[in-house]
Amino acid sequence: MNKPDFEQFLTQSLNDTKHELTPEKDLWPGVERALAKSEAAKPVKNGWNKLAAIAACTVAALLTAQLFIKTPQTNSVAAMSDFFAKQKQSLLVQYEGSPAVTDNWQQQLSELEEAESAIKQALENEPNNSALLSMLAQVYQQQLDLINKVHAPKWQTI
Amino acid sequence: MLIDAKEAFTSNSEDALITKVKSGDQQAYAQLYTLHVKRVYALCLRLLADKEHAEDATQEVFVQLWHKIASFEGQSQFSTWLHSVTSNIAISYLRKHKNWLQKVVSFEQSGMDEQSTADCQGLNGLDKLVLRLPERARMVFVLHAIEGYRHEEIATMLGMAVGSSKSQYHRARQLLKEWYENE
């Protein structure tokens, strides 16, 4: 028997698609545990914390932009690193004790830190390479965004 | 879980369940989970093309939904709203779980290999081919052809131009056709 042509196969398969599939393991216990954990560690709502965090990120983005609009100088990396290290530290201190929405955010943060080290190493040979500087700024910004996002999720974006 | 979805649904209408969940009733939430978990998992599996990631993302959907359900005002059907929440969480899950190199150079992940698709239960022949597609082509194909989203909506969800969504869809169809004909 000849197999149907692709268009027939596609139409037929799309009509037959199952919109419900059963996961192989029971996922509810994990959901229940996560809910219990987040209920137990509900933070005291403080609008100022969130505002301060958003303001810090905005300032960081503005400073980064300013660094790149001007001609890159040899001390750009050090200045940028210093600025972002302070921002990151202050966010981490601010969110200390607040529950994070994902368990593996520290792993994600360490992956971004690995990227930061790799780019800094490349910059040692080419300190004025604007593409590398731009990548470094992006990685720093991603770290700040990650810390903010896991501690102060923006539900409205879902 | 011991709660039977159909039984749960006949004794509590979905609206009543949602009202209970909004007031913090976790038992009602377990019933709501039972009613929708298969739909959520199917969408996560097709978008993420990875069983373990689909399971994680499904759990993430239901954890976030618990916090977010208060904002559901009943203007659309709950299943439609949940579907959109699920799509967005699966997309952001994929972004979050890229390693640093993929993040920095926007490297695109390939899909599942043939052996892994064979291990997924309940999938038809097309599904098994779809899961082998590269990431962007797969997401656009799933959202457009299977889930019925318009390219304009997909472009917004995936942060790409409408033209890119259309070209990824075309690319997906070409690859599927090629694989189907060479099977």
Image (cartoon, rainbow, N blue to C red):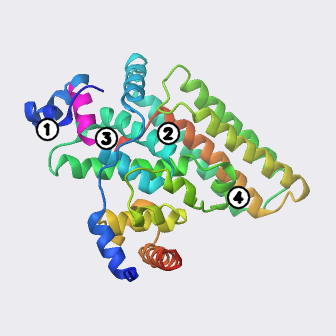
Q: Residues within 10 Å of mark 4 (few under 14, many from 20)?
A: some
The residue mark sitting in front, 2 or 4, is: 2
Q: Nearer the viewer, mark 1 or mark 2?
A: 1
Residue located farthest toward the top when viewing the structure as drawn: A40
| Amino acid type, residue under disc 3 in the picture | Val
Secondary structure at badge 4 equals: helix
Is residue B173 left or right of B15 when viewed as pictured? right
A3 or A150: nearer the eye? A3
Identify the secondary structure beneath mark 1: helix
Residue A134's label in the rendered image is 4
Chain holding disc 2: A
Was residue B33 drawn as part of the magenta stretch in this picture?
yes
Query: Which of the chains bears the disc numbered 3?
Result: B
Q: Magenta segment range? A: B28-37
Inspect the image, locate mark 2, and give the three-letter code of the amino acid beneath it: Lys
In this rendering, do the residues under marks 2 and 4 share a single chain? yes
Q: Are marks 4 and 1 in contact (CB under 8 Å)?
A: no
The secondary structure making up most of the magenta span is: helix
- Identified at 58% across, 59% down, the residue is B113
Q: Amino acid at mark 1?
A: Glu
The residue tagged 3 is: B37
